[in-house]
Amino acid sequence: MADINLLEQRTAFGQVKERGKRWLLRLVTLVFVLTLALYGYLFYSEWNSEKQIAENQSVIAKAQSELENNQQRGELITRQAQVKNANQLLNDHLFWSGLLPELARVTLTQAQYSSVETSTTGDVFLTVTVPTYAEAEKFLQVFDLPEYNQQFSNVRILALGQVEKDNVLQTTMRLQLTLNQDLLKRQIQ
Amino acid sequence: MNFSNFSSASGKEQIRNPMLQAVLMIVIVVLFGWFVLSPKYASNSETRDQLSQVKSQRANLEADQQELNRLIAQLESSDEEIKILDEALPLSGRPTRIAILIETFARNSALLVEQLNITGLEEAIASGDKAMLADPYKPGRELRTIDVTVGVTGNTEQFRNFLQLLEQSGRIIDVESLSVTSEENATNFTVRLKTYAFEALSE
């Protein structure tokens, strides 16, 4: 029967176990060193970031000071607001010179205006004198025709009556018309 | 005594034990990570965020500065346009200038000016504003509306010409309302106008 050397096997197993422990120790030491290196990197990174923040803040403060003390900045801001307001006013600009020719176009030849008033609401108030009630009726009928009521519509009679002038009886009407605002709007060249 | 020596030797032997050293090292790494590395990481992240914000602020400011320089260069090379702008919407609403302008238009249309009233003047200083003279572009200007009522006499064609001159005026003049009254010999025209100035109002 051959002899079995158990002592030798135990020694070999112990050596492997011992080597494993040392490797574990080396590994843990490596992790510790890496941790220290990471801390060093974070420390440097934070220091560097703080330095850059200080530099940037200094540049910002200088640039802001230059911007605020720029002599022409005030003029520029004023001009910008001036242009904005002028453009707004030009967009809302109305051209009233077109009103009188259009009013003449839709008026009977026998009718005479003794007053023409416009309001800010877009209404036109007219005082019209015609020879008879029949002519007054014709005057009103004109605004029922599509080619004549494009600019003036919704004719309301505020007063109607006859007065004698120079021994002649005349019919007078006080009217309120709605004015098409597009008549007054024109493209600015 | 011998027992004590044996115990001390056994303690040294234990410290040299790699397993114990590894466990100690792990404990140190964990404690270092938890109490030192983690707060450092958080503070570093915060600083980097701050840096990113500051860089973005600087980039915006530099862009603003470039834009300002571009606009100033454009302003300096736009003398003609500024003259037109100053005529359309002047920086001073001095009423005498408005009166002169409207009177000129009426005269050029062969109309007789019966009345010329300008209102809404008390809010602004017409002349001698030392603060404004020292800094003509100081902030605080706003659009001011000046109301003008003009009464003229003439015929319809002359009045129409007057309206056209008002419409085509270099200064922005809006007709707010008009009234025409016919009498025996003449036709009277009354126009309510609005013109504007971009000026600082007195406090």
Image (cartoon, helix red, strand yellow):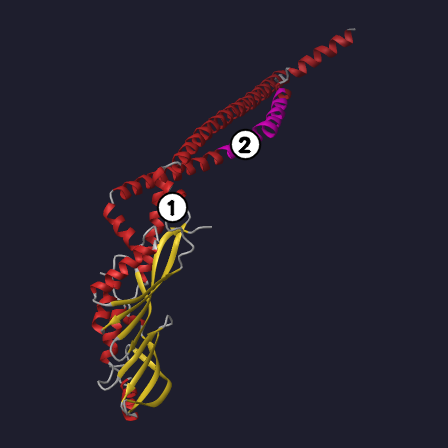
Vertical order, B141 against B40 (above or below): below
Q: Nearer the viewer, residue B20 or A170?
A: A170
Q: Which mark is residue B128?
A: 1
Give the side of residue A91 with respect to residue A19, left or right.
Answer: left
Question: Does residue B168 appear in this view?
Answer: no
Q: What segment is highlighted magenta in the picture?
A: B21-47
Asked where in the image residue A135 lies, by quadrant, the reply is: bottom left
Q: Going by the picture, which residue comes out furthest to the right?
A: B1
Chain bearing tag 2 is B
Give the residue number, with chain letter if any, for mark 2.
B43
Residue B75 percent across, percent down from the top left: 28, 44
Give the side of residue A39 with respect to residue B83, left or right.
Answer: right
Q: Residue, x 29% and y 51% (percent of image)?
A: B86
**Which numbered disc, 2 or 1, marks the residue that appears first in the sequence?**
2
Q: Residue, x 24% and y 43% (percent of image)?
A: B77
Q: Magenta stretch: residue B28 in it?
A: yes
Mark 2 is on which residue type? Ser
Mark 1 is on which residue type? Gly
Main SS category, magenta section: helix
Q: Nearer the viewer, residue B21 or B133?
A: B133
Question: Does residue B161 appear in this view?
Answer: yes
Residue B47 percent across, percent down from the top left: 50, 32
On the rendered image, what quadrant is the N terminus of chain B found in?
A: top right
Vertical order, B126 against A188 (above or below): above
2 or 1: mark nearer the eye: 1
Q: Going by the picture, which residue comes out furthest to the top?
A: B1
